[in-house]
Image (cartoon, helix red, strand yellow):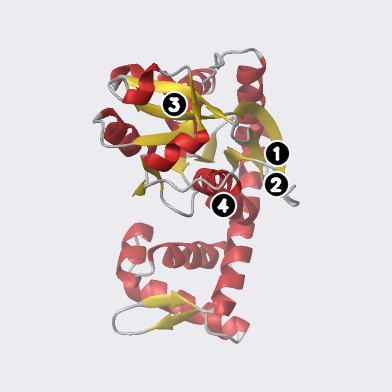
């Protein structure tokens, strides 16, 4: 098998369409189809289920995809290592980060990083925490920033501690309170992230542990949408306290909750050993120094 076939497999698994995958790879659909068939004959299994309306990975295809992504990551690491050895210093960095980190910290970090490393291309993907873990394991991204802890083969380095806070508009009756008792949320309409996000799971467990059931729950898939709804006075929320960095634009109030919600460690996440690239190592050094030196500017609820 060739790296080209691994690239074809990965792209088809991503697009689940021969037409779109062939277009993205800049090859004919027949060439793509033939390469996939060659892989299937070589391995003796079907990698994709095909029908007139859909393309889906088989169980064997999922296994093959994992190995293909790892092989492509190793090949990219080798290429960057050789480029660094030859003094070319060219690189590509793929990052997977959570919504909060992407909105509050990443723009400033990436701006400074690319200024110092002008030949490194950076691609940022905003992902749910669990998806960051999976993509790191497969080598689809080089580094991640998400909520720890993690289990081998992943590794985590703590960047800062994240607290959850109560959020409401400045016109809300609870805005005048210095702190909010959790039981008071039983009478509120609560805006939260959709199920499947780690933050939502933490909040649900916290409310359940203290036997608090909000009158109504509105679900959104972004913090920006939640803050907009809260700012309009339609509801209140529980969200990372650091979101107050952007709240002046929306005129929101952030309050401490009693009893206090659990804190989470926001970590720099690394994939299995052997998949690191020079660009990833440079970014790891940079972002660790960024938070160690206090550039974040800590925010309390």
Query: Where is residue 72 shown, x and y percent of the image?
Result: 59, 56
Q: Circle 4 sits on which residue?
A: 130
Nearest the eye: 66 or 126 = 126
Kindly check if marks 4 and 1 are in contact, taking CB atoms under 8 A apart as contact: no
The numbered mark, 4 or 3, whose residue comes first in the sequence reads 4
In the rendered structure, the answer to whether residue 123 lies left or right of residue 154 reads left
Mark in the foreground, 4 or 3: 3
Tag shown at residue 150:
2
Quadrant of residue 103 in the image?
A: top left
Query: Where is residue 264 shown, x and y percent of the image?
Result: 63, 35
Q: How many residues crowd around disc 4 within 10 Å: few (fewer than 14), some, or many (20 or more)?
A: few
Tag shown at residue 243:
3
Determine the residue positioned at 49% across, 63% down.
10
Mark in the foreground, 1 or 3: 3
Q: Secondary structure at mark 4?
A: helix
Mark yes or no: residue 119 visible.
no
Disc 4 versus disc 1: distance between alpha carbons?
A: 14 Å
Q: Circle 1 sits on which residue?
A: 156
Kindly check if marks 1 and 2 are in contact, taking CB atoms under 8 A apart as contact: yes
């Amino acid at each position: 098998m060739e790296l080209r076939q691994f690239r074809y497999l990965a792209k088809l698994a991503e697009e689940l369409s021969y037409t779109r995958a062939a277009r993205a790879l800049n090859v004919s659909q027949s060439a793509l189809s033939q390469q996939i068939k060659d892989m299937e004959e070589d391995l003796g299994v079907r990698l994709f289920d095909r029908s007139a309306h859909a393309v889906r990975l088989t169980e064997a295809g999922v296994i093959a995809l994992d190995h293909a992504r790892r092989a492509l990551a190793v090949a990219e690491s080798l290429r960057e290592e050789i480029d660094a050895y030859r003094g070319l210093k060219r690189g590509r960095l793929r990052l997977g980060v959570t919504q909060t980190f992407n909105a509050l910290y990443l723009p400033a970090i990436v701006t400074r990083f690319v200024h110092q490393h002008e030949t490194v291309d950076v691609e940022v993907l905003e992902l749910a925490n669990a998806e960051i873990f999976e993509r790191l394991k497969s080598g689809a991204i080089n580094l991640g920033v998400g909520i720890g802890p993690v289990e081998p083969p992943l590794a985590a380095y703590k960047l800062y501690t994240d607290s959850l806070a109560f959020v409401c508009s400045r016109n809300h009756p609870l805005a005048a309170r210095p702190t909010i008792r959790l039981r008071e949320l039983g009478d509120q309409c609560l805006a939260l992230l959709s199920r499947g996000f780690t933050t939502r799971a933490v909040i649900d467990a916290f409310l359940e542990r203290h036997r608090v059931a909000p009158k109504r729950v509105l679900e959104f898939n972004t913090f920006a949408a939640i803050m907009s709804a809260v700012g309009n006075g339609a509801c209140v929320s529980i969200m990372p306290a650091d979101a107050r960095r952007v709240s002046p634009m929306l005129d929101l109030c952030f309050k401490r909750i009693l009893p206090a919600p659990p804190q989470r460690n926001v970590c720099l996440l690394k994939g299995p050993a052997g998949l690191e690239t020079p660009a990833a190592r440079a970014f790891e050094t940079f972002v660790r120094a960024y938070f160690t030196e206090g550039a974040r500017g800590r925010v309390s609820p």
